[in-house]
Amino acid sequence: MSHAFVEVQKAAKRFPGASKEAEPLTVFENISFQLKKGEFVCIIGHSGCGKSTIMNALAGLDQFSEGSMVMENKEISGPGLERGVVFQNYSLLPWLTALENVRFGVRARWKGWSDREVTDHSMKYLEMVGLKEVVDRKPSQLSGGMRQRVSIARAFATKPKLLLLDEPFGALDALTRGVIQDELIKIWSKDQQTVFMITHDVDEAILLADRIFLMTNGPQARIAEAVEIDLPRPRQRASIVKHPHFYKIRNYLVDFLVNRSSELRTQEFDGQGLRYPTPVNPVQLEDAEATTDSPPASPATEPQENLVKFTPKEVRHG
Amino acid sequence: MDRTTTEWKLSLNARATILAIMLLVVGLGVWEGLNQSPLLGGGEALSEYEQLLAGADESAKVPPPSEIAVKAWQELSNPFYDAGPNDKGIGIQLGYSLYRVLSGYLLAALVAIPIGFLIGMSPLAYKALNPFIQVLRPISPLAWMPLALFIIRDSEASAIFVIFICSIWPMLLNTAFGVAGVRNDWVNVARTHELSSLQTAFKVILPAAAPTILTGMRISIGIAWLVIVAAEMLVGGTGIGYYVWNEWNNLDLTSVIFSILMIGVVGMLLDMSLAYIARFVTYAE
Ligand SMILES: Nc1ncnc2c1ncn2[C@@H]1O[C@H](COP(=O)(O)OP(=O)(O)O)[C@@H](O)[C@H]1O
Ligand SMILES: [Mg+2]
């Protein structure tokens, strides 16, 4: 029996080949990971490696071809209110106002509440994301940033145990993105939900995450490593870049995206048992290198060294 | 800059109005003028009538606008008089037609919208019902009339049935099209919030498809109004279609032209009311 809050084991996604004889296309396989309660995990990787597929499976909107998903010891087998989702395209209902959109979620979550309670609760979350003044506008009358705030307010207002965010800020300009990131941190630190978020933005991931999953390129993608971000909280966008560890982490992530994500052939790591992403702490890694006075190791070999040290916990099915 | 644009816009509307009035005045003027001249009044254009109806007098001519205006004034100042089966006010005749159109139309909506929903939601239902729709849809609604008269044995109900059958298709197809085209993202919002199928239908799919459904309803009311005139010419008795035909039989062309105008005005009002309702359900994405 797993004690992790969320446990994904040996997940794979395959599509049938173009013709009957053709090999099926394996987008990713042998993906296993755990999420701890209250943890903020980001996942980064190149387009098409299957991040959205993993997220939609966790949301219950899509299915893995193989593998199992458990949340609080219950199999995930469809969408549910204990898992909230924020999509890149906001997914607000355009015929409802901002307030009505949030009310839509709150009403679905607490069916017994009076209209008054639903409105008050919704307003509280809209105020939290700074939209008090525009609650009566339709999504088409709001800017992209405002729409995404409504969407975030709706997701947080239903108090899901697990919050899934698929590139929530992907369509926003850098300035708006920064403001909403701050709001996300604020609202998250209040409710301490478990968050699983896809992003393309390395800085955003460092700012927000406790751990960052690094995904190799598809097809047959894997989650290679889980980078631990031990920068102190609360974090601020302006000051975090001055932290001595920031650039060590950042360089490590960028190096992964630019070089190693395509070079790593993680199939070689696949044992017969479960394989969790290798935990990596770029800061300690670099310090260790410095003390042993070795020349900078070629990055591609590092994870393998790490993997040898890492003995995956065998987890029996519940 | 702004000022000039607004001024220009205002003047566009104003100029359009002026142009429309000018066209009306010129058109009516030419019509009236031709009527006075011997060319149209006594000469070629109506010579067939005159040959047919020996000794035909002024009443066989296309009446000038002035006569129609007088007629309109008479009719509209007392629209609801009832002096026997062949002499009822224009208001009563239009009322009969509207009653038939609206009953047939509402019945059609009650059938078309749920079935359209089903077809839009279920590819199975779509594939199974599509052949029937494709065959039934192109049939002229009036072709149903003899069958309806035989089965229903009531001219009133048969007229309503014809309206029903002609207004059902645009509503059915538009509903199916609108429902099938609801964005997956919005359905996913319903799914992640654990809405039941019924809740999803009413809280997400219906409002999302409503503008398309309303477009279908607007097309249908237009068709129904076109068809009722022909249907009433066939079944007779009452209604604006019967009225037109009856006045033609009386050779009262003034009344014919007046009722043609009334058909146009009522049709426009029907369309405008549907357009007005559509404003409440449209949304911008
Ligand atoms: N129906 C399909 N048939 C074949 N391949 C598909 C199909 N749907 C998605 N894919 C592939 O699945 C991969 C994963 O997509 P996605 O999860 O959206 O990636 P990401 O979110 O990481 O950019 C993509 O490479 C895409 O080409
Ligand atoms: Mg994606």
Image (tube, coloured by chain):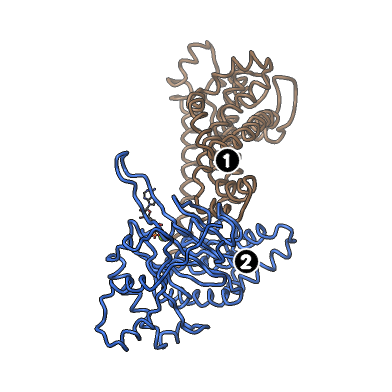
Q: Which chain is blue?
A: A
On the image, the x and y values in percent for residue A295 come to 24, 83
Count every numbered label the image shows and give the total.
2
User: Quick check: B37 left or right of B228?
Assistant: left
Q: Is A310 on the left-hand or right-hand side of A94?
A: left
The residue closer to the viewer here, A312 or A42, is A312
Query: Left or right: B196 with respect to A60?
Result: right
The subunit letter for the residue under badge 2 reads A
Q: For residue B271, which numbered disc appears in the image?
A: 1
Quarter residue A201 falls in: bottom left
Dot 2 surroundings within 10 Å: few (below 14), some, or many (20 or more)? many
Residue B36: x and y in percent read 49, 29
Please tell me whether residue B164 is drawn above or below residue A91 in the rendered image: above
Instruction: Report the residue at 59% width, 60% height from top.
Output: A73
Callout 2: SS = loop
Q: Please, which chain is the residue tagged with disc 1 on?
A: B
Residue at the spot of label 2: A159
Supply the letter of whichever chain is brown.
B
- Asked if residue B95 lies left or right of residue A34, the reply is right
